[in-house]
Image (cartoon, helix red, strand yellow):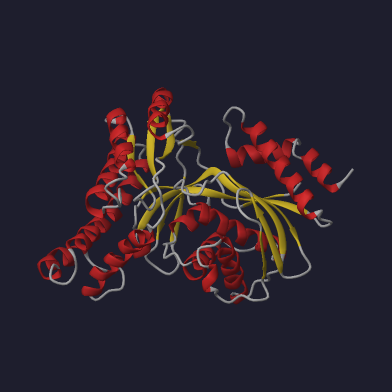
Amino acid sequence: MSMYANMIRNLKTPQVMERLNRLYGNRDGMLVEQTARYVGLLKRHEELFHAEKEVLMISAPGRTEIGGNHTDHNKGKVLAAAVNLDTLSAVSRRDDMIVNVHSEGYKPMSMDLSDLSVREEEKGTTAALVRGVAARMAEMGYKIGGFDAAVTSSVASGSGLSSSAAFEVMTCAILDALYNDFVIDFKQRAKISQYAENVYFGKPSGLLDQMASSAGGLVTVDFRGDDPEVRPMSYDFAAKGYALVVVATGGSHADLTDDYAAIPAEMKQVAACLGEDVLRRVRRDEFMQAIPELRSKVSDRALMRALHFFDENDRVVRQVEALDRDDLGAFFWEIVCSGRSSYMYLQNVYARVEDQSLCLALALAENMLLNQGGWRIHGGGFAGTTLNFVPAHMLGRFVEVMEGAFGEHSCHVLDIRPEGPAVIRL
């Protein structure tokens, strides 16, 4: 029996099925769906690479941002969770520094890790993420090397569940598993991934996405210091009768980089006027007293975005406290207030007057969920997704209305995944 045939057979063992249940949840049909997905990826790897070395299955989850909209890049607080959608690779080690990545839906990529310098022509590409992760790991003293990977992802680009962070965290996990015995802790893995996105890919993101994907589970994170404080939490929304539903509205992310970048930049402008580099180091009362003077130095929008930051940081604390005491009513109120603050003060619900799909999604959610659940903008904003907490008895109707407005498969019903990147040995 070939190595690949043996691996496919091992997918049916109780140990592997239990592992898949942990990673992907227990919804009807999950095991059939994931087994077929793993089999398909192994067959692709065999067709492409005919590996003679061990093939590992390495998965990294997408994430959902529950609280703390645009706070991480100014050293704020967040509440986030890894979810049961993932970027998955079948990967084998090479004896040279060549990396080959065949990712479903994208052109094949080949690169040489002998050169780890930043390349301007790679900005915004998958190659930049791989080179950036490898460069940072090598700089920190970890071993790196070539690999052959067949990749598929259920974290769709533009889904608001952070496909780029899942890919970065997966790449770090690949190099860690193949060359370092999987020893890098989740905080370091998140920082390596963020470095690749900031320096090599060219996107000035905070650390929320990478930290949630890397840590796994439901976590609250305080980014105040250089070593973020991460507190794992345990809360089963499904057991309380609620589903987490992300609605992808279909708005285009094209040409929105400047809109995203303006938010941390304007917050930091306000901080600089008050003698600090980020808003987290500014006292709220100091900011409020300085508003008359600040209006001559920064835009009113920058001031409103700063006010959102201070309020949103406090909201994260109240959200965590509400979950700790099992008060879903208070929690949902803070979720709704977060969304309204993003809408009015942060102003990241739409960038172009002609595309207000997020606004419509929020309006429809409020119409259905008022006093029964929660709804808010999700992630970076401007285009993309909303996050909704939907009572189980309303889920069918909610999905019907949203997909009627935004298209089939625009709703993603999620489970929280209890771990970050995972190595599945078959």
| Quarter where residue 73 is shown | bottom left
Vertical comparison of 269 with 79: above or below: below
Q: Is residue 274 visible?
A: no
Image check: 18 left or right of 420? right
In this rendering, the answer to whether 264 lies above or below 336 is: below
Where is residue 55 drawn, in percent x and y? Answer: 76, 53
- Name the residue at 64% across, 34% down: 33
> 276 or 201: nearer the eye?
201
Foreground of the two, 282 or 397: 397
Pick the residue in front: 164 or 323: 164
- Residue under the image location 32 percent in, 45 percent down: 355
Where residue 106 appears, as percent x and y from the top left, is 60, 52
Front-most of 383 and 7?
Answer: 383
Residue 252 place in picture, x, y as percent: 40, 48
Name which residue lies at 30% across and 47% down: 318
Q: Position of residue 338 (x, y in %)?
A: 29, 46
Q: Is residue 56 left or right of residue 415?
A: right
